[in-house]
């Protein structure tokens, strides 16, 4: 029961925080992870670094971060806002592909995947500004899943080529300072 109450409190906090508007991201962006200690890493689809403009992405493929600048790293999202996060590519049947949570899980550490856009709650994302959370990552955002209330981050916080992207509770730190925040949970449009 405490887990449900805690998730609800975080969800309410993130919804309230989304009402504080910052510079909106354009329709199609690459989302760079805010942890740049090892270089610049972007949200992408596993196996897609070898992708070319004619490839198609399979549903159920895991999300990862990597440095290459490929077309699968282009995403359409409303930031700040609430809705789907759609990949630049479609699947083999030409259907749009959206960011979601594997099996619609609400568990900590569940893998984020790409799947045909279907309107399920796990494909709805509340994207809020770092500034609205008093986090020290100006111009960056947190992606909170509409079903679990958890946020998109890098597994283990180890931002490196091929690291899996998962959902995890948001770590709140000291307002305006780096202490306690996890930069792997923040994403910056470029």
Image: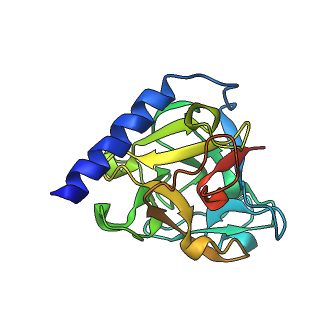
Q: Position of residue 179 (x, y in %)?
A: 66, 56
Q: Residue at x 21, y 53 (%)?
A: 4
Question: Relative to 157, is 183 above or below?
Answer: above
Tell me if I can see residue 68 in this picture.
Answer: yes
Query: Which corner quadrant holds the C terminus?
Result: top right
| Residue 113 visible | no
Q: How is the image coloured?
A: rainbow
Which residue is painted at 65% across and 32% down in the image? 27
Outermost residue toward the left?
Answer: 1
- Above/below status of 124 relative to 112: above
Image point 27% across, 44% down: which residue? Answer: 8
- Asked where in the image residue 124 lies, by quadrant, the reply is top left
Q: From the viewer's perspective, is 93 left or right of 106?
A: right
Q: Nearer the viewer, residue 171 or 127?
A: 171
Q: Residue at x 66, y 57 (%)?
A: 183
Residue 155 drawn at (x, y percent): 55, 73
């Amino acid at each position: 029961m405490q887990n449900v109450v805690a998730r609800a409190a975080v969800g309410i906090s993130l919804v309230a925080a989304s009402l504080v508007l910052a510079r909106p991201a354009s329709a199609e962006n690459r989302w760079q992870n805010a942890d740049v200690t090892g270089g610049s890493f972007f949200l992408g689809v596993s196996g897609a670094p070898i992708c070319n403009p004619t490839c198609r992405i399979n549903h159920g493929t895991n999300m990862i971060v990597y440095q290459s600048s490929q077309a699968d790293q282009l995403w359409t999202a409303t930031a700040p806002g609430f809705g789907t996060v759609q990949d630049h590519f479609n699947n083999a049947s030409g259907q749009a592909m959206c960011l979601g949570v594997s099996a619609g899980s609400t568990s900590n550490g569940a893998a984020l995947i790409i799947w045909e856009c279907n309107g399920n709650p796990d494909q709805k994302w509340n994207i809020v500004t770092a500034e609205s959370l008093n986090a020290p990552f100006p111009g960056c955002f947190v992606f909170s899943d509409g079903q679990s209330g958890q946020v998109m981050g890098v597994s283990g916080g180890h931002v490196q080529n091929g690291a899996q992207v998962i959902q995890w509770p948001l770590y709140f730190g000291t307002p305006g300072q780096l202490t306690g925040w996890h930069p792997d949970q923040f994403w910056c449009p470029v």
